[in-house]
Amino acid sequence: MTDRSSTNNITQTLGLTTEEVFVAHEPGTSKVMRLEDVSVAFNGRPAVRGVTFDAYEKEVTALIGPSGSGKTTLLRALNRMHDTQRSAKVTGRIMLGDTDVNDRSTDPTLLRSRVGMVFQRPNPFPTMSIYENSVAGLRFNGVRKKSLLDEAAESSLVAAALWDSVRDRLKVSASTLSGGEQQRLCIARALAVEPEVLLMDEPTSALDPIATKRIEELIGELKDRVTIIIVTHNMQQAMRVSDRCAFLLMAEDRSGELIEFAATSKLFSEPDDPRTLDYVNGRFG
Amino acid sequence: MTTLSFDSSADPILSRRAEIQRIASASVKRRKVYSKVGIGFCLVCLVIACIPLLAIIGYTIAKGLPAWTTTFFTQPTKPEGIPGGGLYNAIIGSLIIDAIAIAVTVPFGILGGLFLAESDGRIAGAVRFAADILTGVPSITIGIFGYIIWVKNVGSYSGYAGAFAIGIIMVPVIMRAAETAIRGVPTTLSEAGLSLGARKLTIARRVILPAALPGLITGVLLAVARGAGETAPLLFTIFGNQFIQTNPAKPMEALPLAIYNYSSQPYNDLIQIAWGGALLLMAVILVLNVGSRLISARLRREQR
């Protein structure tokens, strides 16, 4: 691969102009994912509507709000997970760099290799070894080169703070790991494909506090590598891990809407909307 | 463009990302074709698997429908060689035998299933294992069992003996279906009952069984469909009867047995009647299957 083509690839995949690649990256300078007036409806009934915000590179963006506010629904729209459900319809524009996520010409499988996902419950493939789990996404995407697989496995397991404890038992079944380790393996599995964006759907809700702490630390370490959008029902967690926060709330018609999007420090101390203030002060939800 | 080298060499992650995305995009066409071929293959297999089913249904309808006359449903079979006659004797026989079998096995099956669902002990394990084995026992074996246990001891072929054999087929099916249905009731419901000071039996009667009702009904109807279609258990137990017999203590006729017997006769009108019987049996089983789905779907909706 020549340098020129790789750079073209990078600029393309990141959706940046060439100039942007060469500016030094400060957090929050470039928008990796842009949502414009995004709505998701099931059987014609809106579950979340009219959401507009941007996710910035090298940042963690948290989606917070009480249950029913459509956080997870919105998150799943970002890598077209709603495709599997016929009753779901996503409208509005979601841009990943200059790729229109919902455009007909966008291949959902290729999109998902650029936008990874970690789920509520750890879901490693039970019949695969730790190693096979970590490179599963690469294999699914047609990577066969052993050196690339090994490199990606190590790099992703290191990044997921799992390498030291599993390096000697890579061939062991993933189901022998503890819950927290399994979730970190799932993060490694998502990272191995080197996605540009990592979606996390309440990744610690099934874990104990110690495992939760480790995942939260991990999130902080990972944001240099990948843009993270995380759904959490836990305000303290949002405060601890995120740089920006989107606060969603269920409207009168029972569909979720975005109340406020701001830097986390601002949203939790001096939000613009009184409802945000009530929520972050624990007056409801 | 001298600075071009800094990106890919300086940042291994970016260069790996670029390589992975290149491989992924390059292989996406091939993967799409694979996917299409695979789905196509699934469809072909599905069609092939459905052909025998559709052929049997079609053929039975074509052959059996002409036999469905008023006499078919209202008259008993005439002796060989004499035209006319129907299957009324077999229909009434089947109804009585299956009704007896249902009346006896449903309580056993459901209470047994309740026990299995609530207990994980050794006895439950053994019973579950036995029930699974029993489900798989060839029905001819159960016919012989019915003959030895009932016909030999009582001294005559009878509808009761047939109901006994059919019941043996049905009990394990109901029991396992009931167990599954009852296990499907969230434990939070029984915990709610416990927290209110209810005893186990009260919870079972007032909370668990009502909540499991859709599944129980499905299980019972499917077991009936299974039992009603069995021939072998009846072969050694009810003997068959060309006359109308409503006393289950006497030898009776039943639909599967009549089909079995008449289809091997050299008389065209008897073979015709056998086709009609086959169609009737198929229709009944279809109705039971569809009906069980409808009933349970409806009950589930009401429970919500």
Image (cartoon, rainbow, N blue to C red):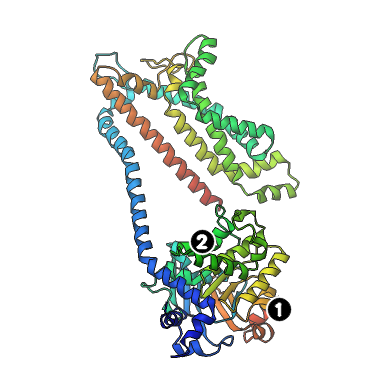
Describe the element under mark 2 as helix, strand or loop: helix
The reply to whether residue A192 is in sight is yes
Give the left or right position of residue B32, taking residue A161 as reference.
Answer: left
State whether discs 2 and 1 lie on one chain.
yes
Where B243 sits versus A202, above or below?
Answer: above
Q: Specify the label residue A136 is tagged with.
A: 2
**In what element is the residue under mark 1?**
loop
Q: Chain of mark 2?
A: A
Q: Could you tell me if residue A53 is visible in this image? A: no
Q: Which residue is mark 1?
A: A281
Mark sitting earlier along the chain (2/1): 2
> Residue B300, position in %: x, y?
53, 49
Say which chain tag 1 marks. Answer: A
Q: Which quarter of the picture shows residue B259?
A: top left
Q: Nearer the viewer, residue A224 or B253?
A: A224
Near mark 2 (Cα within 10 A), the count class, few <14, some 14-19 or many ≥20, is many
Residue B215, numbered label: none
Q: Position of residue B245 (x, y in %)?
A: 42, 16
**A261, above or below B225, in the image:** below
- Which quadrant: the N terminus of chain B? bottom left
| Residue closest to the eye, A175 or B138 | A175
